[in-house]
Structure formats: C-alpha cells, structure tokens
Amino acid sequence: MNARLAAILVLLLVLLGGGALVVYEQQHAIQPSNVDTLGRPLLKGLAAAKITGIQIAQPNKSIITLEHKGSGWVIDERGESPADFDRGRASCPEPPERKNGTGDRT
C-alpha cells in the first residue's frame, strides 16, 4: 500500500469518527432544562380538596370555568350545567407514555 492511499484512508477514518462523535453528542445533549426538578412534587403544599374552581384557557379562544358547587363540578359558561367527566375524558386523546425522571413509567 502506498503512502497516498494510506493517508486517504486515515483521513476518511478521522472524518467518519468525527461525524459519529457529533451525532452522538447531539443525541445525548438533549435533556430538559428542569432536570433538577424531575420526580419532585409540582405544586408543593397544594390542598386539592380546597380547590373551588379551575379555568381552562387557550390563546385567542374561549375560556371554560369549572366550579365546585355542592357535591359536584359544574361548567359556569353553560349555565352551571353538571360537568360530565366521563364524556370529557373519552374525547381527550391518550397521553404518550413518559418517564418521570426516576426510571419508572407513568
């Protein structure tokens, strides 16, 4: 093997290795900015039993207000009609399976 062919093969090997390193670093550099908070309670000290209302809003869209009245929840914008959670849950897509940061699937 002459020196020119050996130099070309070494150059190709270096380029291939460098490309593989760049791809490897890009894939492993993707991590959430909140890594230190993964697995911790989101709203620490929140007393869920004391929540009396929830507003769901989308930018430039209507707002839905759920209020806890009596023994159930009602939709304020619909004349305080009862909220049907089973029907609402059926119309929502299933969320993708995700890891919660502790290795357990949620």
Image (spheres, helix red, strand yellow):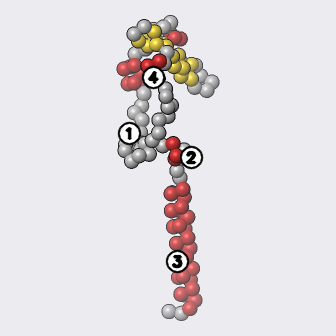
First-in-chain label (4 vs 2)? 2
| Residue annotated with mark 2 | 33
Residue assigned mark 1: 106
Residue flagged by tag 3: what amino acid is it? Leu
* Residue sitting nearer the eye, 38 or 17: 38
Q: Earlier in the sequence, mark 3 or mark 4?
A: 3
Three-letter amino acid code at the position of disc 2: Ser
In front: label 1 or label 3: 1
Please identify the quarter of the rendering in which residue 96 is found. Answer: top left
CA–CA distance in space, label 4 to label 2: 27 Å
* Kind of residue indicated by mark 1: Thr
- Describe the element under mark 3 as helix, strand or loop: helix
Q: Nearer the viewer, residue 47 or 59?
A: 47
Q: Which residue is found at the position 52% from the left and 46% from the top?
A: 36
Q: Residue at x 54, y 82 (%)?
A: 10
Q: Residue furthest bottom?
A: 2
- Helix, strand, or loop for circle 4? helix
Query: For mark 4, what is the residue?
Result: 48
Q: Nearer the viewer, mark 3 or mark 4?
A: 4
Question: Disc 3 to disc 4, how far (Cα)?
Answer: 60 Å
Of labels 1 and 4, earlier in sequence is 4
Task: Name the residue nearer the viewer: 41 or 2.
Answer: 41
User: Distance between the Cα atoms at labels 1 and 3?
Assistant: 43 Å
Q: Kindly identify which numbered label has been placed on residue 95.
A: none
Disc 3 marks which residue?
13
